[in-house]
Amino acid sequence: MMGRMALADDDSRNSTPSTDLSTRTAPEPPAAALTAAPAAPPGPGAASPAGPRWLLGLVAAGMVIAALNLRPAISGLGPLLEEVRRGLHMNGTVAGLLTSVPSLCFAVFGGLAPRLARRRGPATVVLGGMVAIALGLALRPLAGGTTAFLAATALALAGIAVSNVLMPVVVKHWFPDRVGSMTGLYSMALALGTAGAAAVTVPMTDALGGSWRVGLGAWALLAAVAVVPWAVISRGRSDRAPGAQSAPETVPGQPGEQAATGLRITKSPTAWALGVFFGLQASAAYITMGWLPQIFRDAGVSASAAGVMLAVTMGMGVPLSFVLPKLAARMRHQGPLVFALGVCGLVGYAGLWFAPAAGAWVWALVLGVSNCAFPLALTMIGMRSRSHTGVVKLSAFAQSTGYLISIPGPLLVGSLHDVSGGWHLPLLLMAALMLAQMATGLLAGRDRVIEEGR
């Protein structure tokens, strides 16, 4: 199940690496296994685009609206974190926990998605996910204390987790001949929702009276809108077992498939390097998403401007998520890209140390570039195996390991801020984590495949 979950989660968060890898000039492009099955004409029992054209249009629209809802619960909280902390009497450690909860929920609840999809159909589960997001976001402003706030947040994140995993399943079921374009469509919508929530939350809160409760709760309306198309889609007869597959079937004759079948992934140094690299880049992303606005605000930047800067940081992923995988797929060693992204992160942290307000826009931009280590990590997962079975195993291992590694980072940043009363100590931790990310990324980027036991 973890293999299915992790591969689906790869595709759901950024599918461009798998499609872009098809341009690799090496004899056996690893991503071929990921793209060949959906693109092939459907056979008996395979997923096929069922239903009239209007239904396919509704599915496409539903995917976009759903993707817009997969990050506002996280990125919309950062700009208002100070108000939430005051309103709920929340200390820095608990506030840091809020930025660590997404990783935990993605690891825990995302694993339930394939099993639920096999029983109920993917569209029905996505519908349930949208309902959970709407309820969680609606209940969060009503919380009278930290525990209730965390519980409501976890409910919303559970809906995000299962929907996140099942988006590529929906694509493969209804659009098997347009996997690349449709996954690109919802990936762009996901990035837009991330950046948009960061930019709009504070102005929207001010326009609605200035209460953080109203500002955060307003995002429940967008989730409620997403419920409508999925309620219609889930009633269709095509939402059954064929679309519940979370990964294409193994191709027995594919090179490396036999070696990958008996592979012990925990024996591979490359797999461990990728898992740690994935976790460190995820930790850096969640630290940025949760704490960057507060760093700017403490330096004298207004709340609305801090939100817009976070939106700029998150928005950098829209164009770069298309460029980086193509570039990485043409390189035998992705180490130079890892190094370049890491240097951008270190420059951003140095700027936040010495001139957080004066160069705020510059630091937001370079940190946005650094955050694009995520699509690079997904690309390397596809390139470090010759076979579909190997990619599934590597993806499951790297993501499950990575999510666990990413949990403490944001929590430690909040704790260190409370202890020191400033941001210098947290920035030192962030820089140390970035150096570790660069080191493990250089190892993971070497031209090796796990089937060779390396």
Image: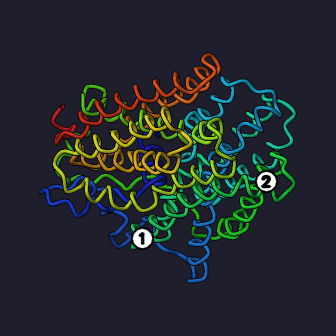
Q: Label 2: state its secondary structure.
A: helix
Residue 137 appears left or right of 400: right
Residue at 20 percent of width and 59 percent of height: 24
Of tags 2 and 1, the one toward the viewer is 2
Pointer 1: what residue? Answer: 181
Query: Could you tell me if the residues under marks 2 and 1 are in contact, i.e. CB atoms within 8 Å?
Result: no
**Residue 284 at x, y percent in the picture:** 47, 36
Asked which quadrant contains residue 6, the reply is: top left
Pointer 2: what residue? Answer: 205
Q: Amino acid at mark 1?
A: Ser
Residue at 34 percent of width and 29 percent of height: 435
Residue 284 appears left or right of 302: left
Residue at 57 percent of width and 51 percent of height: 309
Q: Label 1: state its secondary structure.
A: helix
Question: Distance of mark 2 from mark 1, alpha carbons?
Answer: 35 Å
Residue 237 in view: yes
Instruction: Name the residue furthest bottom.
Output: 53
